[in-house]
Image: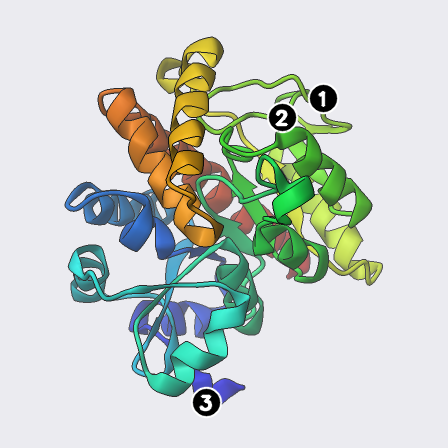
Amino acid sequence: MKQYLFFSEEVSATKKQGKPIVALESTIISHGMPYPQNVQTAREVEQIIRDHGAVPATIAIMDGKIKIGLSDDELEMFGKSKEVAKASRRDLAYLLATKKLGATTVAATMICAELAGISIFVTGGIGGVHRGAETTMDISADLEELAQTNVAVICAGAKSILDLGLTMEYLETKGVPVIGYQTDVLPAFFTRTSEFPLHLRANHVDEIASTLKVKWDLGLNGGVVIANPIPKEHAMEEKFINKIIESALKEAEERHMTGKDVTPFLLAKVKELTEGKSLEANIALVKNNAVLGAQLAVKFHSMKA
């Protein structure tokens, strides 16, 4: 396994020093945002994590290796390149074997983070059960990964383009804790709230860190979702965004889009229909998650020491 892992200088030095590390995905760079906002956001998010006492490790597939931490030039390349595959669990072995470029999704980032000994991972939003999944069976691999991989995922909930009710049911069935950070309801990415209540709430980072430690000490395998609402000043109005999402979903259906092509299309359409406001919201919520993720990594690391 070790022969497939390549640590950047910064991450390698941090591991030797025994300091906290936060994993970051690369799909958000290659497929989640347009250039140059994607690279600029990636750099800013990494710096936020450093500023709050941890070290960022952006993960990607390159040259037959799982890169744990990217250089500035590599971030730029992933942001510009049109030849980057979207890598989930099913794609990892093929991309490594063929030495192709791969940007890791939530699921793949969780796998790679666990292999690298990193427990805390910051992203924008998790995937979930797609609308109409009762007939299409279109369910994100993120959910299955959360059921089996020991990594905590800080996110702004699940994207409201999904069936949030079925997503929560799926996570409950798989025994995945969903902890609302200072909230009693599931945030829905662009909005701070949804109609779905959460059974677990933490008002302080210490509570989340303690929960992670106890869970994994008990041998209860699987991840934890920490749902961190988008900051109020960047949140979008629920009725407004839901109307736009309905319109985007209808167009995707008319185009007979399926699988992992759906989400990038929907997000691009939402960006277009909100005149760019959704991109601003996306950037703001990722930065907000980075702050919480770094704070959690520092606290969780101190409990393990």
Badge 2 marks a residue whose secondary structure is loop
| Residue for point 54% across, 31% down | 228
* Mark 3 and mark 1 residues within 8 Å of each other at the beta carbon: no
| Residue for point 49% across, 39% down | 125
Front one among 138 and 47: 138
Q: Earlier in the sequence, mark 3 or mark 1?
A: 3
Question: Outermost residue toward the right?
Answer: 218
Q: Which mark is residue 3?
A: 3
Q: Which mark is residue 186?
A: 2
The type of residue carrying mark 2 is: Leu
Q: Is residue 52 something one can see in this rendering? A: no
Q: Which numbered mark, 3 or 1, is in the foreground of this view?
A: 1
* Mark 1 and mark 2 residues within 8 Å of each other at the beta carbon: yes
Give the quadrant of residue 131.
Answer: top right
Q: Earlier in the sequence, mark 2 or mark 3?
A: 3
Q: Name the spot of residue 35 as percent of width and height, x first.
A: 17, 46
Q: Which mark is residue 60?
A: none
Q: Earlier in the sequence, mark 1 or mark 2?
A: 2
Instruction: Answer above or below: position of 137 versus 11.
Output: above
The type of residue carrying mark 3 is: Gln
Badge 1 marks a residue whose secondary structure is loop
Badge 3 marks a residue whose secondary structure is helix
Q: Name the spot of residue 65 as percent of width and height, x first.
A: 38, 81
| Residue for point 25% across, 27% down | 272
